[in-house]
Image: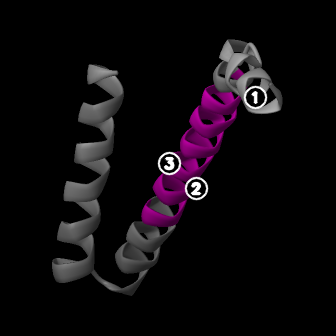
Amino acid sequence: MTTQLCQDIETLEDAIINLTEGASDEKRMAIWALERLLKKKQNELAEFETTLEEMIVEQQDGWACNQLVA
């Protein structure tokens, strides 16, 4: 996680520099890098949510629902 975080920070730093100081091709590359980082983070979040949902489903034993029926 730490290595990944450092890489993400470096990507963001480079993108900021390229967007503020770079020529048009460098700006396009910065936007592409940001889009790629965004897509990666969206995929990580979706994977996390799926894992969390699976854990919640596995943890449910129906006890609370059974109490409502009684």
Residue at 38% over, 68% down: 30
Q: Determine whether label 3 and label 2 are within 8 Å by CB.
A: yes
The residues colored magenta run: 34-54
**Mark 3 is on which residue type?**
Lys
Give how far apart the Cα atoms at labels 2 and 1 are: 38 Å
Asked which secondary structure carries label 3, the reply is: helix
Please tell me whether residue 52 is drawn above or below residue 24 in the rendered image. above
Question: What residue is shown with label 1?
Answer: 65
**Circle nearer the N terminus (3, 1):** 3
Question: Can you give x and y, in whole percent of width and height, for residue 4 in the image?
Answer: 36, 29
Which of the 4 image quadrants contains residue 46? top right
Which of the 4 image quadrants contains residue 12? bottom left
**Mark 2 is on which residue type?**
Lys
**Mark 1 is on which residue type?**
Cys
Question: What residue is shown with label 2?
Answer: 39
Please tell me whether residue 26 is drawn above or below residue 41 in the rendered image. below
> Is residue 59 shown in magenta?
no
Question: Can you give x and y, in whole percent of width and height, for residue 15 in the image?
Answer: 29, 65
In this view, the residue in front, 35 or 48, is 48
> For mark 3, does the 10 Å Cα neighbourhood hold few (<14), some (14 to 19), or many (20 or more) residues?
few
Q: Is residue 36 left or right of residue 2?
A: right
In this view, the residue in front, 15 or 23, is 15
Image quadrant containing the C terminus:
top right
Question: What residue is shown with label 3?
Answer: 41
Q: Is residue 21 left or right of residue 27?
A: left
Give how far apart the Cα atoms at labels 3 and 1 are: 36 Å
